[in-house]
Amino acid sequence: MDNSDLTTALEGAFAHPVFDAQAAFRAVLSALAEPGTVHALPAAGPPAPLSAGAGAVLLTLADQETPVYLAPAFAAAAPWLTFHTGAPVTADPAAARFAAVTGLNALPNGLSVGDDVYPDRSATLIAPVRLSGRTLRLAGPGIDGARTLDADLSDAVLARLAANRALFPRGLDFILIDEAGAGVVGLPRTTEVTCTSQ
Amino acid sequence: MTLTYNFAYLDEATKRMIRRAILKAVAIPGYQVPFASREMPMPYGWGTGGVQVTASIIGPDDTLKVIDQGSDDTTNAVSIRAFFARVANVAVTTATRDATIIQTRHRIPETPLSAGQILVFQVPIPEPLRFLEPRETETRVMHALEEYGLMHVKLYEDIARHGHIATTYAYPVKVEGRYIMDPSPTPKFDNPKMHRSPALQLFGAGREKRIYAVPPFTEVVSLDFEDHPFAVQAFDAPCALCGATGVYLDEIVTDDAGGRMFTCSDTDFCTQRRAAEAPNV
């Protein structure tokens, strides 16, 4: 590691660790409690290409108790993550409590979905999403009837989400980071996602 | 030396652990997520679970209301409100409408909650099956297998013995058609308010080390039978102070000669109604 890598790893924390973590948590909580709504995250500066939003979520939720899986593209963020959170970076998806991936179409195999007795022991995915393209219809807990969300999720991804929902109460939960900004959208395992446009 | 605490009392590592539990609880409505409950500067049974949940979610911009059996001015409510005013320096209120977070012991306010509000329940026994099956290993498996026949037997035995379902508080509910959940010892009068509430409902049990949640607009159905449908308590007379009907009333003993009156359990609701009726008083 040369000095520029070291500087990258040391910088990019929350400006106000206590209050920014609280604000980021409330954004993620609102996002998962009301799937399809977009909430602003406080600024964080992880090494590219890991997004600021994904970095903010990891700074808020990850620590020495939560192994984190980083997609190979995010390998440069590993020293940053370990320095700021103490979280062990794991290459084994099955061991990960959080997984930062490059998209919903690029999920590693073997992520934990919990078991029937302890369905909370499942991985939480952090993935970028483009909030335009297709019009999606969301339904389920947190939604009064139905909510529309514009996002570029392919049919294959929607099928993956439907299969995940069918596992309930087991399943993965998704924290999606708007590629264009630092907004966060939640898709918990309970949300039914269908496409209403082509 | 002045003692200072981290914002909202809990250290950041504890908050992170509780926050992770809350997020999984929201993702699995009605399921009890284990968490590493901490000792708090108050005894178990005084709302340590609710306090830990509130401490983990509250921020400087929040306005906190705390109620104890509907009342803003009983010991538990006053001390928890003062606790957060001191350790988090947040605004506090008694007005349901002005609060962003409402911590409650055993009531849901009469004033309808709105989107964006968070209701935090203090829960003594989170496991609805506990008095039917004492072993945690067994109740875990019963929830996993959706094996809830025992609960219906319990309600049936109520009917066989009393002619009606005699459970009046901590009345079991089914959340989103899956998990049976203890709504905490709220009177069953409040169960319908949980159904499709626009507010997020979080439940913290400190001694039992469990957190669970009901997201907004989630189905919360009280268990019953076709021939013995669920019904809430009804009161013969309106509130003696504000005249409200269709609200939950407390019995207040007024003298040593058997005198008593029935008044709103929700003191904020009652006060606001009386203020509106007599604006010049």
Image: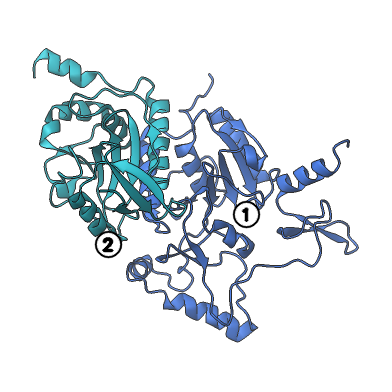
Dot 2 falls on a residue whose secondary structure is helix
- Provide the residue designation for mark 2: A166
Three-letter residue code for mark 2 = Ala
> What amino acid type should be assigned to the residue bearing mark 1?
Arg
Check the residue under mark 1 and report the chain it is in.
B
The quadrant in which the N terminus of chain A is found is top left
Within-10-Å neighbours for mark 2: few <14, some 14–19, many 20+: some
Q: Say if A165 sits above or below A184 in the image.
A: below
Q: Position of residue A125 (x, y in %)?
A: 24, 44
Check the image and name the residue furthest to the top. Answer: A3
- Chain A as rendered: colour: cyan
Disc 1/disc 2 C-alpha distance (Å)? 35 Å
**Labelled pair 1, 2 in contact (Cβ < 8 Å):** no
The residue sitting at 29% across, 48% down in the picture is: A197
Query: Which residue appears at 32% of the width and 71% of the height?
Result: B145
Residue in the image at 58% along x and 29% along y: B86
Q: Which residue is mark 1?
A: B107
Is B214 located above or below residue B165 in the figure? above
Spot occupied by residue A68 in the image (x, y as percentages of width and height): 20, 39
> Of residues A86 and A195, which is closer to you in this image?
A195
Residue that protrudes farthest toward the right in the picture: B257
Q: Residue at x 46, y 74 (%)?
A: B132
Frontmost of labels 1 and 2 is 2
Determine crowd level at label 1: few under 14, some 14-19, many 20+ residues with C-alpha closer than 10 A: many
Task: Check the rendered structure and report the hue given to chain B.
Answer: blue
Q: Is residue B256 left or right of residue B207?
A: right
